[in-house]
């Protein structure tokens, strides 16, 4: 199967109308549409280590959720003479690797593919509730068995193999209703007040976040907590909150890939923590 045929089938399976190139970041970043696929790797981000693992596995097609070239639009105009770009590009080209970004169409599915993997990884599908109101489309809300903010943080630390989980609020606060805003969702998707409005209107105890801006949601939650309100926040980071959609993507791709091997490679957190 060729890369173009594989991608066409992916978009068809999402049920989403294909976006024109100028309205999406879901582009072929490297390689050729007519390449025959020997194997597929799914990952949050096509880092150098992920590319090397794809090469070692015999795969020549990487499906990445996030950018390959260090900016949201994967623009390479500014990278023409950049040594990091040139060496990474050389590695990719020497081994004939095609990289396609699966971002917009994945989030636009009726069942957002990233949240599908998140729920599967944590076993949280049974706790998810139907959101109401004008922000029903935004993120996801869950009614969990009673726990505390600290216990919830430790759950994520173990389940997602994290050295550090940042939290805002009283660690002992009771937690029942949580919102999950993966990746950049916790920045508001262009409207930075959306996470706060969701917390208020959805009667949310704890917001579980990917990215943060310290003067928005974290400031709101901290003030609420300091006023004695039962509000908290956990910060997983962009990668740890979204990687699971890519981990469970190979299963979703089975009906397309047939006999072509599909392997997940964890991009892992970009940080090293010093205590």
Image (cartoon, grey):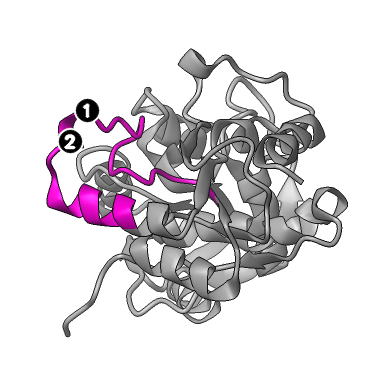
Locate residue 180, reporting x and y percent: 54, 49
Is 169 within the magenta?
no
Q: Residues within 10 Å of mark 1 (few under 14, many from 20)?
A: few
Labels in figure, total: 2
What residue do we see at 58% from left, 26% from top? 135
Residue 233 in view, yes or no: no
Q: Residues within 10 Å of mark 2 (few under 14, many from 20)?
A: few
Is 77 within the magenta?
yes
Residue at the disc numbered 1: 77
Locate residue 235, reporting x and y percent: 37, 59
Residue 260 in view, yes or no: yes
Left or right of residue 268: residue 79: left
What residue do we see at 57% from left, 40% from top? 102
Residue 80 badge: 2
Residue 117 badge: none
Locate residue 245, reporting x and y percent: 62, 54
Quadrant of the rendered image containing residue 58: bottom right
Left or right of residue 78: residue 213: right
Q: Quadrant of the C terminus?
A: bottom left
CA distance separating discs 2 and 1: 6 Å
Dot 1: element: helix
What residue do we see at 41% from left, 73% from top? 172
Segment colored magenta: 63-90
Task: Depth check: give the residue in front, 123 or 78.
Answer: 78
Dot 2: element: loop
Quadrant of the rendered image containing residue 264: bottom right
């Amino acid at each position: 199967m060729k890369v173009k045929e594989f991608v066409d089938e992916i978009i068809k399976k999402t049920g989403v109308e294909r976006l024109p190139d100028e309205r999406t970041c879901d582009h072929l970043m490297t390689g050729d549409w007519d390449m025959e696929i020997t194997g597929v790797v799914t990952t949050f981000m096509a880092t150098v280590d992920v590319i090397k693992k794809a090469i070692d596995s015999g795969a020549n097609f990487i499906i990445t959720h996030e950018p390959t070239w260090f900016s949201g639009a994967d623009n390479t105009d500014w990278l023409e003479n950049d040594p990091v770009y040139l060496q990474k590009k050389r590695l990719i080209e020497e081994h004939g690797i095609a990289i396609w970004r699966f971002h917009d169409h994945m989030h636009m599915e009726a069942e957002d593919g990233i949240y599908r993997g998140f729920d599967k990884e944590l076993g949280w599908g049974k706790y998810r509730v139907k959101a109401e109101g004008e922000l029903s489309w935004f993120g996801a809300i869950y009614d969990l068995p009673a726990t505390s903010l600290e216990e919830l943080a430790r759950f994520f630390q173990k389940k997602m193999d994290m050295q550090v989980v940042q939290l805002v609020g009283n660690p002992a606060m009771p937690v029942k209703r949580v919102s999950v805003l993966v990746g950049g969702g916790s920045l508001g998707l262009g409207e930075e007040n959306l996470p706060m409005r969701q917390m208020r209107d959805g009667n949310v105890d704890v917001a579980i976040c990917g990215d943060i801006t310290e003067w928005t949601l974290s400031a709101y939650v901290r003030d609420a907590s300091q006023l004695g309100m039962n509000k908290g926040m956990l910060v997983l980071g962009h990668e740890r909150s979204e990687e699971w959609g890519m981990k469970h993507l190979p299963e979703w791709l089975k009906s397309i890939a047939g006999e072509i091997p599909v392997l997940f490679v964890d991009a892992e957190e970009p940080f090293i923590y010093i205590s």
